[in-house]
Image (cartoon, grey):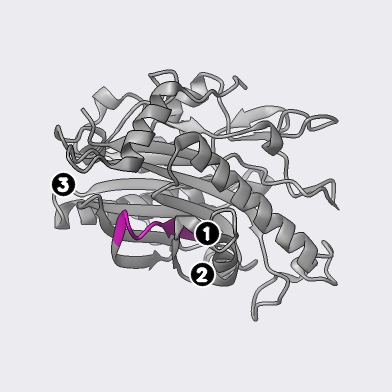
Amino acid sequence: MKKLLAYTFLALLLSVGGNCLAQNKVKTYVIGFYNLENLFDTYHDDGKNDFEYLPDGANEWTEVKYQKKLHNMAKVIKAMKEENHVYHAVLGVSEIENRHVLEDLVNDPQIADAGYMIAHFDGPDFRGVDVALLYQPTKFEVLDEESLPFNFNSPTIVFDMDSTQQANFHTRDILMVRGLLGGEMFAFFVAHLPSRIGGKGGDLRSRGAEIIYKRADELMKEFPGIKIVVMGDMNDNPTDESMTVFMHGKENIDDVQEGDFFSPFISMLKAGYGSLAYQGAWNIYDLLLVNHSLAKAEKGTLRIVPIVRKKFYGRIFHKPFMTTQEGQYKDVPYRTFSNGSFVGGFSDHYPTYIVVTNKD
């Protein structure tokens, strides 16, 4: 994977946004997503299969390990703040067990000054992992929150599962949070689409994207001009059918029409970038897509801007401390467990983000 660089342009842009230069009304915000890789507490949640993340479970998940995990996740968020000169205004997260772990995370001393609030619903996932949205209330005013359940009521998709299997299938809900970012109407969707385990689930991920797109389309009709960001661990690359067909993702911003979404990580994947590695191949499952209103915003309003090499609209954030430095897994994300042993790393995914600004 090609090494990612931080550029002076981004630092200057964000430092201006951080100060907000009230006299010029310049606003710049970082919007991102991070798969926290199994952020579990040490207690059992009724009805959930979280037993491996208990002190007497397979992972011997003690308070010491939990605190190390929290510290590491906060360290990454802080490192992104240091690079950008501002915290993310909005940060979607996945693989979190419950609201308790989120409260512990946002109160970590490294990032407590961000003042993050939490949007989260307990979902039906068998293991108990959910998605959530962290946001700074000084920048984003929440008006509405929804938890969108996964269902099989597709008008177009033929599923591999029979009716019994469908009835017994439980996966993460999709989170939608609508509100005002910098005074403009936004909606954020956070998803963790069904797994690729066993080489299956393409139909399920397409259905997940279909559910997101349908609700986004409803919002665009109800609130003309609303700006929408879809983010999450899609368990698919941006070039896969779920993202190009069912999410209407377009590689080139100039090709984005009403009803389409601009998918900035398509070009980055083709250029050799990746947010996670599997069997020697790099993928970008950690995606952000923006609708036409945000991709082609009117002058003086918030719009997505290129931030990497002055041409890529997405950023995959990684630093040496987040990356395995030696051994079998050298140069891939430094994760919490390796070969069944606790190694005290971070996540098997790198976080991703975009920047929106009204700066001309």
Q: Are marks 3 and 1 in contact (CB under 8 Å)?
A: no
Q: Nearer the viewer, residue 350 or 138?
A: 138
Q: Nearer the viewer, residue 229 or 315?
A: 315
Hey, which residue is sitting farthest bottom in the picture?
46
For residue 147, which quarter of the picture? bottom left
Sequence-wise, which precedes: disc 3 or disc 1? 1
Q: Are marks 3 and 2 in contact (CB under 8 Å)?
A: no
Q: Residue at x 31, y 54 (%)?
A: 139
Magenta-colored span? 131-141
Q: Nearer the viewer, residue 126 or 22?
A: 22
Q: Which amino acid, mark 2?
A: Gly
Image coords of residue 170 (percent x, y): 56, 66
Query: Which residue in the structure is indicated by mark 3?
Result: 225
Instruction: Judge whether 303 appears above or below 112 on screen.
Output: above
Instruction: Judge whether 78 appears above or below 309 on screen.
Output: below
Label 1 secondary element: helix
Image coords of residue 85 (percent x, y): 45, 38
Gap between marks 1 and 2 measured at Cα: 26 Å
Is residue 210 something one can see in this rendering?
Answer: yes
Q: Which amino acid, mark 1?
A: Ala
Query: Which residue in the structure is indicated by mark 1?
Result: 112
Sequence-wise, which precedes: disc 3 or disc 2? 2
